[in-house]
Amino acid sequence: MGQIALEGMQFYAYHGFYEEEQIIGNNYVIDVYIKTNFGTAAEEDDLYKTINYETVYLICQKEMKIKTKLLETLAARILYGLKYQFQNMQEATINIKKENPMPGVKLDSSSIQLSQKFIDQCPRCSNRFICYQDENCWCQEVKIHEQTQSMLQQKYGGCLCKNCLAYYAG
Ligand SMILES: [Zn+2]
Ligand SMILES: [Zn+2]
């Protein structure tokens, strides 16, 4: 397992609960840390499997442009964007720092952190695998008969690993 980090991405943006903040704006600094398995990407030399710095930056840039009241909401949207783009994250952490959050008060910054782990244990074979637990999960692309799907849902509740799903696919 390895970690990819983008630290100190700077944006000028217009987030905040108060109208003032949405007009004047603030400086924001974002850090993103993604844990992934370099093994597969290196072995298969597959760009799709690697986490691309540029894409991570573009996801943050895009979300920073949308005025948002709460930084928590913003971080959740960035996380969603990462999940949508990358199928192989084992863990993701997003820090968003707002500089000079209270004009006229001596306060350097306020910040929030959103961190989530995606490693799960397969309820059928007990192997560990990645599951995003939403529509971004790789399992959504596996073609499984509707009846089989609801049977699996009833029997196991959540997502199965790739090998087990392949067994039911087709
Ligand atoms: Zn399994
Ligand atoms: Zn899944």
Image (cartoon, helix red, strand yellow):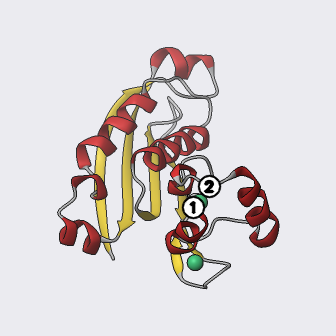
Q: Quadrant of residue 40?
A: bottom left
| Horizontal and vertical percent position of residue 84 | 47, 44
| Horizontal and vertical percent position of residue 139 | 55, 57
CB at disc 1 and ligand 1 closer than 8 Å:
no
Q: Amino acid at mark 2?
A: Ile
Q: Looking at the image, in which quadrant does ligand 2 appear?
A: bottom right
Residue drawn at x 34%, y 32% is: 11
Residue indicated by mark 2: 144
Earlier in the chain: of badge 2 and badge 1, it is 2
| Horizontal and vertical percent position of residue 55 | 29, 42
2 and 1 marks in contact (CB < 8 Å): yes
Residue density around tag 1, few if under 14, some if 14–19, many if 20 or more, within 10 Å: few
Q: Amino acid at mark 1?
A: Ala
Viewer-closest of 82 and 104: 82
Q: Is residue 166 visible?
A: yes
- Rendered view: 130 above or below 8: below
